[in-house]
Image: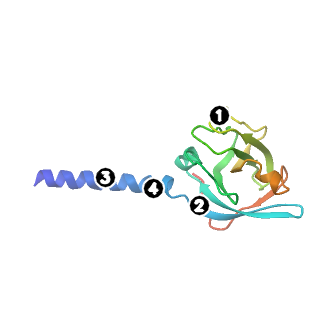
Amino acid sequence: MILRANLLFVLFVMMVAACRDSDAATPSVFDLQITQGEASETLKVEIAATPSQRQQGLMFREELAEDAGMLFLFPGESRNGFWMRNTYVPLDIAYIGFDGTVQEIRAAKPLDETPLTPAQPYRYVLEVNQGWFERHGMGVGAKITLPAGLPGAQ
């Protein structure tokens, strides 16, 4: 009887732990509007709002659709650089201010662990396929419109 109770307790603890880490396994996807002048595009972005989601990012992906990306949400201003550890897709990393303005775009090489640190603090980061901004006639100064219902950044 005691063995059964202990086994049930261990299974319960494992289930609770699995539920707590489920945010990293199933990121939310939203439509993100990006505009600059006459150019306007919509991306399907996965949201990285928790520390574990931000740490995982786009690691281990072998491809990324042209209309897809990942939007990193931070609870406040950040100054940390991004790197490409275990990331196989060449990316543009756009550092975005609290007002939704793209402040800087850095080209990131697959598997390069050199931190790409922006000149200014940022609130959001958008990762897309390398060259996406140029192909769509956008760059520094583009505006993102955050979709309704985004999770709060942790």
- Residue, disc 4: 22
Residue type, mark 1 in image: Asp
Residue type, mark 4 in image: Ser
Q: Mark 4 and mark 2: span between their CA atoms?
A: 14 Å
- Horizontally, residue 94 falls left or right of residue 16, namely right
Q: Mark 1 and mark 4: span between their CA atoms?
A: 28 Å
Q: Give residue 112's mark.
A: 1
| Residue nearest the viewer, comparing 23 with 131 | 131
Q: Residues within 10 Å of mark 4 (few under 14, many from 20)?
A: few
Q: Give residue 151's mark.
A: 2
Residue that sits furthest to the right in the current view:
37
Q: Indicate whether 52 appears above or below 38.
A: above
- In this picture the colour scheme is rainbow
Mark closest to the chain's N terminus, 3 or 4 = 3
Mark closest to the chain's N terminus, 1 or 4 = 4
- Secondary structure under the numbered disc 3 in the rendered image: helix
- Secondary structure under the numbered disc 2 in the rendered image: loop
Mark closest to the chain's N terminus, 3 or 1 = 3
Q: Residue 135 in the image: state x and y as whole percent.
A: 81, 54
Q: Indicate whether 118 appears above or below 145.
A: above
In the image, what residue occupies the spot 79% across and 37% down? 119
Q: Indicate whether 51 appears above or below 42.
A: above
- Horizontally, residue 6 falls left or right of residue 36, namely left
Q: Residues within 10 Å of mark 2 (few under 14, many from 20)?
A: few
- Secondary structure under the numbered disc 4 in the rendered image: helix
Residue 138 occupies which quadrant of the picture?
bottom right
- Residue, disc 3: 13
- Secondary structure under the numbered disc 1 in the rendered image: loop
